[in-house]
Amino acid sequence: MKKKRQVAFPRAILKNLADEIKKMAGSNEGRLFILEMVEEIPYDIRAQVIEGLSAFYEDEIVEFFQLLKAEYGSEMESLCARALEKFSMAGLDISSPIFFQGSLLKAYATCSRHTGRLSLDIAWKASGKGVHVESFYLTFNADGLHSFFLVENMPLAQFEHDRQVLGEMVELSFDEASLLISQAFALNLRHMSRPSVGRFLYQKYLSHSTTISEIQERELLHRISPRLTPRQLVNSFFYALKYQDLSYILSLISTSHTPQALQQFDGFLKLGKTLLEGQVEEVYASGKHARVIASSLGLKDHELEQHSYCFYLVKVESGHWSIVDIQSLPSQAKTRTNLTNPLEANVFCRVYEITDMDEFFLVLDKIDNIREMEELPYGIHMRLTCFEDNFNHGVSFFTGVIADMIINGDEFVVISREQSTVAEIHKLFISLSGIPVIYRGEYEVSLLKAYRYLGGNYVYFEDVLVDQEGEQVFDDGMRFISARYLVKDYKKVWQRMGELSLVEIETTVDYRVYYQLEDRNGAPAFFAEYILGPNWLSISAFGELDLNQARQSLEKEIYEYLEYDGMELKTEGFFDILSSEISRENPGLEKALKEMYLNKWYNSHLSTLSGMSPSEASQSEEGKRLLWTMFKKIGQREKKGLVPGQQKRINLKEYMRKVEQGKEGKI
């Protein structure tokens, strides 16, 4: 494969960075700042910048590379090894430093585990006069170990005073603190999200082999959660289900009834089914027994599924309620609340023109609870969030979301389900002096249209209003979607690819292309595409169900070597891989891909055919009518030259040929 020429950075820039590192390398607080600086370097050039720093032969730079090695592990292992070898040959001492030594004094956690979030403060007696305090903000969702910060040489009296002022906090043992930190960190690995910097310090908790039993873990979670009413407990169950917080879910269910009770929610606890809504409807309680009726709305492969449940609870000796059974109610059972498809809701949008981008970001910094969601092609998607703490209400599609905020070029858009919310945010902007935006208007649009704008389908928001096409769907019903990852350890990921039954396409480009096939009625059909670059990976498939299966298969045992980077609809489709270079090197590839694609299409259940496959549709009058409608759309697009990505390579005659071959049994 061809190797890209490495980017060379001016020595003056690297020297400024090296000088900053040397100033901060002497303390753990400074080392945390150094790691924050490293995280700010764009991922695409981070390795080259760090490699460039190895040109400075100084003790502090040696310690910097040891810090990176301790913080990032295998992700930067080879890079650090090369640098340290250079330093060693130059006569510098490259022995590993000891970043911290001390003895545990006390650990405290907030009584908020039921919310899926808690703060944890751990005080250590170190060599200084005061105490070394490590503070964590743990979230038991995809964010995992969200935040970590350090206060060195804090007076012990101040630490004790702060714990009292902060309200109800529970004292923990080292075992218990390590368990909570490890569980939050495990969720970072599971969701392939990056934990907070500072692992060089908190690795001692992750490495600790805890002796806590399952019963002791349940007791711990009860101690750091308040007593909830039956309604609140079941609603908190749905919140935990939404965020895949299995340890909290298990703490709510009686040990002897766990397997049977969780059977009802198996689909939600695995990739492939999303909880959109879940809430308590009715509660019947008497003494130590309670019965709770609840409903949920799930989404799986674009199909909405509504379920009703009956939770049976008993009050245990500690005063907490415990779930002893969960039964699924018949689908025809009447529920008081009628859960509707939240994707059909309308949202309110206010549009602004940004006159000074730098000033505008300074204004946004003044607003609390704004969280960056993802980078967009020409901007950024942020979210203004809130959290439910009393759980008198259940999960809704908009749970925790006050508003979405999108910067798209010089346009700023606020999106919310409530008109009053966008009005309040507008008042907030007006109240801030010197706000660098000009108000352009307010609009009410469907949620799907708003999120297509968010996905980069429109240059300006007003383009949404003149779009007559509706939701973009390929005429043949095949949606090609892709999951993206950053690769932390190329070798480990490449080895994992070799363990799967994949077909590799020989190329000289700087990425590897693999295909996973499946048998469809005796013919090889496409299942998934894998593209592995130097520091990135994409997995693509038709529909969420296939993509989730492909992801589960690959991610197994290599979570820590990947960082999930989002999903996208690949509008160029299945044949986007056929660059002029790859086509020249593999002249028969396009024909093979066409056959794999058509075999997949012919046997896939498509929403445009009312859930039938083209194979099934060709055998009924209604199916033939739907097929004809599909073919008519494809033909009309071909005449107008408006054929979307993957259909540019396949014309109408080839679809019709595949159907005729199926009728004749020639597939």
Image (tube, grey):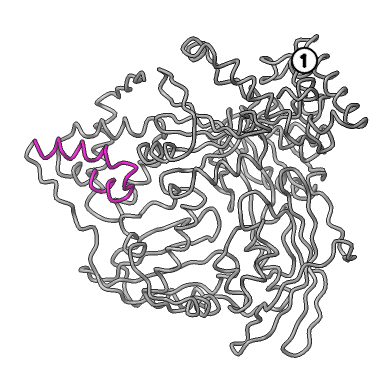
Question: Disc count in the image?
Answer: 1
Residue 362 lies left or right of residue 203; in this view the side is right
The extreme front residue here reads: 665
What secondary structure prevails in the magenta region? Answer: helix
- The reply to whether the magenta stretch includes residue 103 is no
Instruction: Indicate the quadrant containing the N terminus: top left, top right, bottom left or bottom right.
Output: top left
Residue 151 lies left or right of residue 459; in this view the side is left
Residue 111 lies left or right of residue 573; in this view the side is left
Residue at 57% x, 62% y: name it: 245
The percent position of residue 291, horizontal first and vertical second, equals 78, 79
- Amino acid type at image mark 1: Leu
Relative vertical location of residue 584 with respect to residue 517 in this rendering, above or below: above
Residue 508: image quadrant is: top left
The extreme right residue here reads: 621
Residue at 73% x, 28% y: name it: 602
- The reply to whether the magenta stretch includes residue 68 is yes
Residue 312: image quadrant is: bottom right
Mark 1 = which residue? 652
Q: Nearest the camera: 439 or 303?
A: 303
Q: Nearest the camera: 494 or 142?
A: 494
Q: Magenta segment range?
A: 65-89
